[in-house]
Amino acid sequence: MGTIFAIANQKGGVGKTTTAVNVAASVAEAGHETLLVDLDPQCNATVGLGLPKDTTPSIYDCLAGETTVAEAARPTPFPNLSAVGATPDLAGATVELPRMPGSETRLREQLGAVRDRYLFTLLDCPPSLGPLTVNALAAADRVIVPVQTEYFALEGLAGLLDTLSLIQRELNPRLTVAGMILTMHDGRTKLAQQVEREVREHFPELVFDTVIPRNVRLGEAPSFGVPVIRHAPTSPGSAAYLKLAKEVAARA
């Protein structure tokens, strides 16, 4: 049976989608059947894999009960990697989902039918703790939390951890934190060094060894619709995500 990872942090701009796309591509590159589900109405993970924003059926159709994840999952240009894309219509789900019976577990029910098909499933969450993220956390086995190494890094982590505790208690007792990944790290600055030290001191058992550096190639790759391991395979960003993928697989 496969493992489902949610990539979550209610703070925006911390590297959730970059992490979801590149970890998914890296574990697929290692030969493991992998599924990436885009749960963000901005559709960045969809575009980052070279799929159009008007992809149908989409995850919105799955949550609305009009189709299944098995039917919506489509191959990407990358071997062993499939994706369920998002469309801007997904923004409406934040209003519609709470009105549906069993709304918090609709994604879990959908993914249950394909767990044996994919060794790894990654859920790219929006930058909020709304219904879409709650669905992802209710469906996931593990959570990966990207943390930007800047001043407000620890801000919001307490809220996220409180939400995780609530989900564990009410909806998903098997949910655990796989780890926190430090992103956009510039090791030349004292601020980044200080933030890394503080996060590792606060959460000594949870922080991944791998640190994702600030890297121009990571920022460029989505505009070409490819993960960085394809766009710039020898770049520091590519090396970091390949290393992170090994750590993630070890914590599955």
Image (cartoon, rainbow, N blue to C red):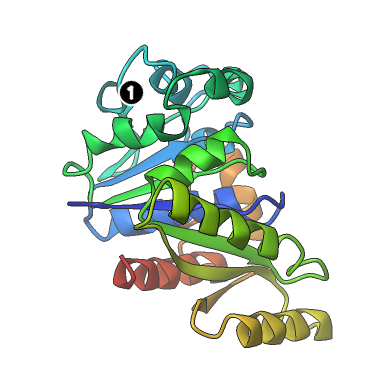
Which residue sits at x=34%, y=58%?
Answer: 174
Residue that appears at 46% across and 58% down: 143
Q: Is residue 173 left or right of residue 7?
A: left
The front one of 172 and 37 is 172
Q: Position of residue 196 (x, y in %)?
A: 68, 81
For label 1, count other residues whose C-alpha is less than 10 Å away and answer few (under 14), some (14-19) or many (20+).
Answer: many
Q: Is residue 204 above or below residue 227?
A: below
Q: Where 60 sits versus 21, above or below?
A: above
**Do we see residue 70 in this rendering?**
yes
The residue furthest top is: 66
Circle count: 1
Which one is in front, 147 or 23?
147
**Residue at the spot of label 1:** 72
Residue 48 visible here: no
Position of 43 relative to 28 (above/below) = above
Apparent side of residue 215 relative to residue 75 in the rendered image (left or right) = right
Percent of width and height locating residue 239: 47, 71
Per the image, label 1 sits on a secondary structure element best described as helix
Residue at image coords 51%, 53%? 7
> Residue type at mark 1?
Ala
Q: Pick the quarter of the image with the C terminus.
A: bottom left
- Toward the front, the furthest residue is 170
Which quadrant of the view contains residue 147? bottom right
Residue 20, position as x, y percentages in the image: 48, 51
Residue 99 figure quarter? top right
- Residue 139 placement, left or right of 167: left
